[in-house]
Image: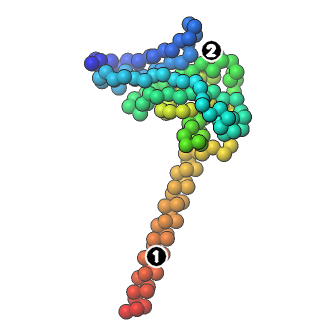
Amino acid sequence: MLEKLGNRKLIINKYIDEKLIYSWEINGDDIQQYRDLDTLVEFYSSSDKEMNELTNHAKYLYFNNHLDTSIFSYIKLKIYVSDEYNNNDIYGYTYEDKKLEKVYEALKYNENGYIEIDNIHIGTSLVTQAEISGCIYKIIAIVEYVIIMIICAFAIYTLVRSKSKKKKASA
C-alpha cells in the first residue's frame, strides 16, 4: 500500500536512448492505495490508411494511452513531437468508432520539442497542425441530441393529443 503523497505531484518519465519521449504528471493526492498504473503510451496505428483518410492526409502524431485518467483530479501528458510542430497551433483529437472528435484546441509547442496536454482522455488520440473538417465536435453532438429530444417530445405530445381528441369524438 502506498502512503498518501499529500500535495505532491507524481511524475513518470519514459526515455529512449536518454531522450525523454513522454512524461505523465499526476496529482499525488489522488493515489490513496497501490494499484497498477498503466502509463504506457503507444505511438503506432494499425490503421494508417484509415487515419490518413480521416485527416485528409495531414501530418499527425498518433498515440494511445491506457491510463484511467478519470480517477485523477489533475493529470498532464507531455509528448515529444520534435521541431516539426514549431510555431503553429496544434489540435488534438480522440479516435473512437472510426471517427475523430476534436477535444484539444490550440495546444502549444514548447521550445524543447514537446506539447503538453492537460486532463488527457484515456484511449486513442492524435495531434496535428491541421484543423480537420468533418470531425465530430462535442458541442454539435450535444445540440443534435437536444434537437432529437425536442422532436421526440413533440411527436409524443402530438400522439397523445390526437388520441385524446379521438376519445372525445367517440364519446
Task: Residue 6 in the image: state x and y as whole percent.
Answer: 32, 19
Query: Along the line of sight, which residue is nearer the eye, 135 or 76?
Result: 135
Q: Which mark is residue 64?
A: none
Q: Residue at x 38, y 31 (%)?
A: 71
Residue type pointed to by label 1: Leu
Would you say 8 lies left or right of 121 here? left
Q: Which badge, 1 or 2, comes first in the chain's sequence? A: 2
> What's the distance in space between the residues labelled 1 and 2, CA to CA?
63 Å
Task: Residue 150 in the image: state x and y as whole percent.
Answer: 50, 63
**Which corner quadrant holds the C terminus?**
bottom left
Q: Residue at x 60, y 19 (%)?
A: 80
Q: Which mark is residue 112?
A: 2
> Which of the 4 image quadrants contains residue 57?
top right
**For mark 1, what is the residue?**
159
Specify the farthest residue to the top.
Answer: 18
Q: Is residue 4 above or below residue 66?
A: above
Q: Secondary structure at mark 2?
A: loop
